[in-house]
């Protein structure tokens, strides 16, 4: 095998025996990535390959340090077969979350274990060429200094806020002043294979894989941050829609309030329940004389962020509690529409507001119960995300892995 990158290059035009064997070997890796350790007999049966061919190809993967021979497996009787599993240190993937005020970069292995992480806090996302240069230079620096052999890092998944067409590799919110897709710009700059993804969808995939039960295959991830969005998993796969824009939940025209949303439309869900909307309400109420422990920040002309409001609620600030509960009730009514439409097994709530715990979840669930069909609601589980800020980067690294090994 000339290189790992060539081995996993699905665009090769070689259709001979070598190509066929590489295709089978990739299938072996993909099978182990999903199902774990396996014997030669199991691999032969599942992949429909002859025993001599499977024995030869698995041994090649062992020699190449991609698969490990884990020794004999216990059986009720007869000859004990050897069992094989993936070697975690053979192949790696990078994940990068381009957030509004920081970049989080991770390295994961073949089994989706997070093995390295670094955060660039001196970053602000703007729609400027200098910001794009900063994104590329940070990724280059991260790959160069992460301590892993570059030749073993087979791809870089990059997720960014806003609308993203993953197939075309385009962001429709940032860096749109050129005809060249953002995916192509980053890929040419860093010289590595790149996957561009929406940040909420990337986090949804991480949430689904790390918190679901074994029987769950239909999940909605509800992100309540500065904006409002959802990620959808249907039959175990992310749902993209025609152009990759599925999940713009925050832009449903839910209110007759004449408030202009960031998208340019009026009355969107985000105009009432997003972190930005709650911040604006808090500032307006404090300006009108309302009592809150956040008044000192307002009088000091310091920005009141949604995280400050959540912290204040958790410290029994009545005004903060009222604003969060009001948002929970309103978004719960909208979630009723979601579960009536998709009938998911679980709704996972994440983002800044999720940290408010029961202050957001109790009114959300109560309103959902009130406005949804009882048959649907009783079969839907609700839970708060337990993942950290690195979930977006972790999720897009997992999606990069899936694309590389053909899952």
Image: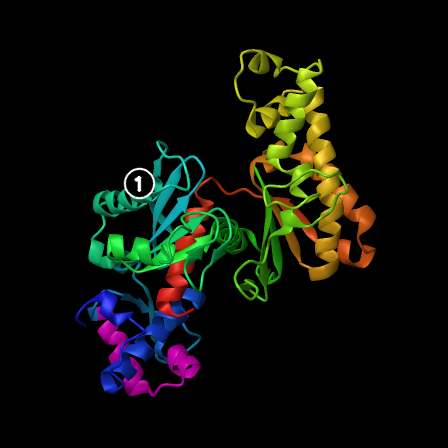
| Residue with the most extreme left position | 2
Question: Does residue 141 appear in the picture of this structure?
Answer: yes
Circle 1 sits in a helix, a strand or a loop, which is it?
helix
First to last magenta residue range? 41-62
Residue tagged 1: 134
Image quarter of residue 98: top left
Q: Is residue 352 above or below residue 335?
A: above
Q: Is residue 44 magenta?
A: yes
- Residue at x-position 75% and y-position 51%: 336
Q: Compare residues 331 and 28 and report the one nearer the observer.
A: 331
Quadrant the C terminus occupies: bottom left
Q: Which x, y percent locates residue 64?
A: 21, 68
Left or right: where does residue 154 sit relative to residue 256?
Answer: left
- Mark 1 crowdedness (10 Å alpha carbons): few <14, some 14-19, many ≥20: some
Residue drawn at (24%, 43%) of the image = 141
Total numbered badges shown on the rendered structure: 1
Residue depicted at x 45% and y 38%: 100
Q: Is residue 61 left or right of residue 387?
A: left
Task: Please state the horizontal and vertical placement of residue 206, each as a whole percent of the image.
Answer: 49, 52
Residue 76: image location, x then y, percent? 44, 75
In the rendered image, which quarter contains the N terminus?
bottom left
Residue 378, can we see it?
no
282 or 120: which is nearer to us?
282
Whole-percent x, y for residue 162 in the image = 50, 48
Q: Main secondary structure of the magenta part?
A: helix
Residue 384 as seen in the image, left or right of residue 163: right
Magenta-drawn stretch contains 382 = no
- Which picture quadrant has residue 19? bottom left
| Nearest the eye: 204 or 60 | 204
């Amino acid at each position: 095998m000339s290189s790992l990158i060539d081995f996993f290059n699905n665009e090769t035009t070689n259709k001979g025996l070598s190509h066929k064997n590489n295709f089978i070997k990739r299938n072996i890796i993909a099978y182990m990535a999903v199902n774990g350790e396996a014997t030669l007999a199991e691999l032969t049966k599942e992949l429909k390959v002859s025993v001599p061919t499977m024995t030869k190809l698995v041994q090649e993967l062992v020699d190449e340090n991609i698969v490990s021979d884990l020794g004999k497996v216990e059986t009720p009787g007869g000859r004990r077969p050897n069992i094989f599993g993936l070697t975690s240190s053979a192949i790696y993937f990078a994940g990068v979350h381009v957030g509004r005020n920081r970049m989080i970069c991770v390295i994961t292995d073949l089994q989706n274990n997070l093995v390295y992480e670094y955060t660039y806090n001196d970053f602000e996302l703007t729609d400027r060429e200098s910001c794009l240069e900063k994104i590329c230079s940070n990724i280059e620096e991260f790959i160069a200094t992460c301590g892993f052999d570059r030749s073993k890092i087979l791809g870089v998944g990059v997720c960014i806020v806003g609308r993203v067409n993953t197939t075309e590799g385009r962001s429709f919110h940032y860096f749109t002043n050129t005809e060249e897709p953002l995916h192509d710009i980053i890929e040419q700059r860093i010289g590595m294979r790149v996957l561009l993804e929406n940040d909420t969808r990337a986090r949804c995939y991480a949430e689904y894989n790390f918190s679901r039960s074994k029987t769950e295959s239909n999940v909605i991830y509800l992100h309540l941050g500065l904006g409002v969005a959802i990620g959808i998993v249907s039959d175990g796969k992310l749902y993209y829609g025609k152009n990759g824009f599925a999940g713009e939940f925050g832009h449903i025209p839910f209110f007759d309030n004449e408030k202009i949303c960031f998208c340019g439309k009026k009355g969107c869900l985000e105009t009432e329940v997003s972190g930005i909307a709650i911040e604006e309400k808090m500032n307006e109420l404090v300006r009108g004389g309302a009592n809150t422990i956040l008044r000192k920040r307002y009088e000091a002309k310091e920005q009141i962020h949604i995280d400050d409001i959540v912290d204040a609620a958790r410290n029994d600030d009545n005004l903060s509690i009222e604003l969060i509960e009001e948002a929970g009730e309103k978004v719960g009514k909208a979630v009723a529409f979601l579960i009536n439409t998709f009938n998911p097994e679980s709704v996972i709530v994440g983002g800044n507001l999720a940290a408010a715990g029961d202050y957001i979840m109790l009114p959300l669930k109560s309103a959902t119960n009130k406005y949804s069909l009882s048959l649907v609601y009783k079969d839907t589980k609700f839970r708060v995300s337990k993942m950290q800020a690195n979930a977006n980067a972790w999720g897009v690294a997992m999606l990069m892995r899936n694309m590389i090994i053909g899952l």
